[in-house]
Amino acid sequence: AEVNYLGQLSHPNLVKLIGYCLEDDQRLLVYEFMLRGCLENHLFR
């Protein structure tokens, strides 16, 4: 439900959700690669 909505989002400031995997109690979201380092470094500079 929510993951399908995230996959439809399109905005220049958002990385695109490429896909996801649900297996047992494991959840994995796959996003496009973001240049210029990790998000954590950009948020806490």
Image (spheres, rainbow, N blue to C red):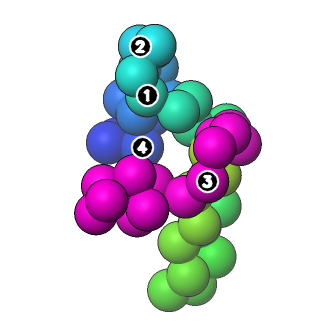
Quadrant into which the C terminus falls: bottom left
Label 3 CA crowd tier, 10 Å (few <14, some 14–19, many 20+): few
Q: CA distance from mark 2 to mark 1?
A: 5 Å
User: Tag 2 or tag 3, which sits nearer the N-term?
Assistant: 2
Mark 2 near mark 1, Cβ–Cβ under 8 Å? yes
From which residue to which does the magenta span run? 32-45
Name the residue type under label 1: Leu
Q: Residue furthest bottom?
A: 25
Name the residue type under label 2: His
Name the residue type under label 3: Gly
Quadrant into which the N terminus falls: top left
Please name the residue that numbered disc 4 is placed on.
3
Please name the residue that numbered disc 2 is placed on.
11
**Residue at left offset 55%, top offset 58%:** 38
Label 1 CA crowd tier, 10 Å (few <14, some 14–19, many 20+): few
Please name the residue that numbered disc 3 is placed on.
37
Please name the residue that numbered disc 1 is placed on.
14
User: Tag 4 or tag 3, which sits nearer the N-term?
Assistant: 4
Q: Position of residue 26 (x, y in %)?
A: 55, 81
Q: Position of residue 3 (x, y in %)?
A: 42, 43
Label 2 CA crowd tier, 10 Å (few <14, some 14–19, many 20+): few
